[in-house]
Structures are given as C-alpha cells and as structure tokens.
C-alpha cells in the first residue's frame, strides 16, 4: 500500500486510511436530513452549556450530570442504530454484551477504587498541601472561561498521558487492550484494561468539591464533544468544530490497523494539542484494531498488562543474564 505523506510520516502504508477532509464522504439524503446532521453537534453542545449556565443550584449537581450523561448516550445509541456510519461497525449481540460488561466494570470497580487510592485521596492531599487562596483569581473569572480552562488543562494532561501510553512500554501494556477494538460505538470508551481506565480517570473528579458549576460545565464539553470520538454515526461536522475538537474521524485514524496512523490524534475532547505538537492527522479509517483485527476476549484484556509485562521482563532477563554456559565451538 502506498499511503499518504503527512509531515514526515507515511500514513496508511499497512492499512487503508482516508487522509484529508475533502476525501471524506458527506451525509447523503434530503435537505432536512443533511441539515439535521450538520447542526446536531453544535446545537446539543449549546443546549447543554445553556442548561449548566442557567440551572438553579438545586439542579446543578453531579447527580444531574450523570442522568444527563446516560440520557445523551442513549439518544446517541439510537442514532447509531438508525444511521450507522459504517455497516461493518454495527452492533452485534456479542459486541453489546462485551461492551456492557466493561461499562458495568467501569461503574462499580473503578468508582470503588477511585475512592480509596484514586482522585479523592489525591485531591484531599492536594487541597491540604496547597494554599487555595492563591487561586482566588481563578474563581473570579467568568464561569465559561473557568470551564474552558479546566477542560483544556485536563485535556492537556490526557494528551500527554495517552501519548506516553503509546511511547513507553509499561504504560502501553495497560492501553493495548483498548486498541484491539475492531469497531467504534458510543460504549467503546469503556473497553480496555481497568488499570488504564484508572490512569485516564485520575483527576476526573478533581474540581468537583470546590468549583462545582465550572467543573460541571467542563464535564459538559467532555460529554457533548468527547463522546463523539467513539460514535458510529456520520455527521457533516462544521469546519470550526473539527479544527478545534476531536471527532470520530480523528479517533478512527487513531484506532486504525495502520501503525503510523495509530500514533496520531491523542487528544480526548480537543484536537488542538495534536495540531500544536504535530501529531494530528485529519482523516478517517474503517479497518480498526491490532494484529489484523483480532478480537481480544475479555479474559485476555483483564490480564494482558500482567502477562505481557511478565513475558517482556522474562525476555529482558534472558537476553542479559541467561547466556548459554557452553558455547559450541565453530
Ligand atoms: Zn491510543
């Protein structure tokens, strides 16, 4: 395969990747349908921002955020069923059951672990060991600016954590199972080894205790933008949106079977850090996964970092210390 040159790299050398927005298909059909898929994303984002901006204090709680989050995802799953982007990505019973397992695992296990050694413990420590009055300048900023800053700071951390996962073997072992998914849909963000979800989740709850409204607004950016990175629906996403934000197109390139393509688009909600640090590829891919699209079973995904870590350590040891004692003479 020839591939396409993007910067210094050849994208699509091992597996097909469509590079460039002008080469990506648009939504087909009548004018109403086209209009719907053009304005849906910005309209939903605006509506959610307006809600969190104007909601009374009694409504502006983390519980409301969770209910809205679930409702929004159910709506998007409905759209995936009616208007799939790729037929090959359509949900099967087998996919759904495995997705539900990971979602259940995420909600129970991770929320338990988080309380003890995750965000809450770290935030407690941070709150105690830092003079928060120094942050007064922050809380006097307009609410929307606070929310944008929280979202950008958090995404900046996610960008480097994710890029680190692709470049440092111990972290890669925790992230690799997520790259064995062979299709994208709304639930796929939850699929992976729990250790990874914990690393990515570190600090998510961070600002909840002391900046509730701004944090809830920042969370809305994640919901109304970041959720689309795994969606199986085609949108006529506006140009400004795909310049600023991560999209399912960007993320499908990241999940491509093509090795070079998978080393791009590390952002979660925003794509601008990829643009700034030179890892952005505007395009899309349909053939996803690792090892030519081998599906990783749940059991393997659960133990992968440990079994692979052990195998790597054993190889390393062998290469250095386990030299054969008697070398045959030549
Ligand atoms: Zn990745």
Image (cartoon, rainbow, N blue to C red):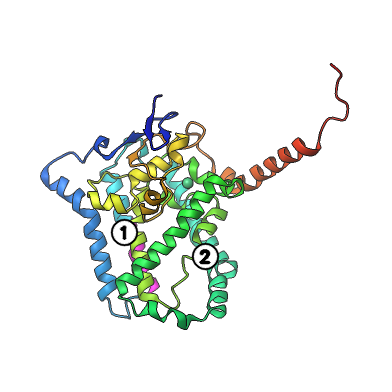
Q: Which residue is mark 2?
A: 111
- Label 1 CB sits under 8 Å from any ligand 1 atom: no
Viewer-nearest residue: 51 or 268: 268
Residue found at the far front of this picture? 8
| Lateral position of residue 60 relative to residue 259, left or right | left
Viewer-nearest residue: 241 or 54: 241
The answer to whether residue 80 is above or below residue 324 is below
Provide the secondary structure element on which disc 2 rests.
helix
Q: Position of residue 179 (x, y in %)?
A: 49, 43
Looking at the image, is mark 2 or mark 1 earlier in the sequence? Answer: 2
Q: What range of the chain is rendered magenta?
A: 61-73
**Label 1 crowd (10 A; few <14 / some 14-19 / many >=20):** many
Residue found at the far bottom of this picture? 133
Q: Is residue 201 magenta?
A: no
Q: Position of residue 211 (x, y in %)?
A: 40, 76
Please identify, in this view, whether the residue under mark 2 or under mark 1 is nearer the observer.
1
Q: Position of residue 89 (x, y in %)?
A: 36, 39
Q: Quadrant of the C terminus?
A: top right
**Label 2 crowd (10 A; few <14 / some 14-19 / many >=20):** some
Viewer-nearest residue: 216 or 74: 216
Q: Quadrant of the N terminus?
A: top left
How many numbered discs, if any? 2
The rendered magenta stretch, by its main secondary structure, is classed as: helix
Identify which residue is drawn at 36% across, 45% down. Answer: 250
Provide the secondary structure element on which disc 1 rests.
helix
Q: Which residue is mark 1?
A: 224
- Label 2 CB sits under 8 Å from any ligand 1 atom: no
Q: Quadrant of residue 68?
A: bottom left
């Amino acid at each position: 395969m020839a591939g396409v040159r993007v910067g210094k790299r050849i994208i699509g050398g091992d597996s097909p990747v469509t590079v460039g927005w002008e080469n990506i298909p648009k939504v087909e059909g009548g004018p109403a349908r086209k209009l719907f898929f053009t304005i849906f994303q910005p309209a939903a984002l605006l509506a959610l921002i307006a809600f969190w901006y104007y909601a009374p204090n009694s409504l502006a709680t983390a519980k409301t955020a969770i209910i809205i989050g679930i409702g929004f995802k159910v709506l998007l799953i409905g759209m995936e069923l009616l208007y799939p982007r790729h037929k090959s990505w359509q949900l099967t019973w087998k996919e759904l059951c495995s997705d539900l397992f990971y979602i259940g695992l995420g909600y129970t296990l991770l929320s338990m672990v988080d309380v003890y050694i995750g965000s809450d413990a770290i935030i407690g420590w941070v709150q105690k060991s830092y003079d928060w009055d120094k942050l007064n300048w922050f809380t006097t900023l307009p609410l929307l600016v606070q929310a944008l800053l929280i979202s950008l700071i958090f995404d900046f951390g996610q960008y480097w954590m994710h890029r680190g996962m692709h470049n440092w073997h111990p972290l890669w072992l925790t992230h690799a199972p997520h790259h064995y998914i062979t299709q994208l849909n709304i639930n796929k963000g939850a699929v992976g080894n729990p250790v990874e979800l914990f690393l990515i989740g570190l600090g998510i709850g961070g600002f909840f205790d002391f900046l509730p409204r701004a944090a809830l607004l920042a969370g809305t950016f994640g919901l109304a933008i970041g959720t689309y990175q795994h969606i199986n629906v085609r949108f006529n996403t506006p140009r400004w949106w795909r310049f600023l934000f991560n999209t399912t197109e960007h993320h499908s390139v990241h999940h491509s079977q093509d090795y070079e393509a998978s080393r791009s688009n590390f952002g979660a909600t925003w794509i601008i850090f990829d643009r700034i640090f030179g890892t952005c590829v505007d395009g899309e891919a349909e053939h996803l996964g690792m090892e030519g699209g081998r599906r990783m079973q749940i059991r393997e995904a659960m133990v992968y970092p440990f079994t692979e870590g052990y195998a790597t350590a054993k190889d390393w040891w062998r290469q250095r210390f386990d030299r054969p004692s008697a070398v045959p003479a030549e």
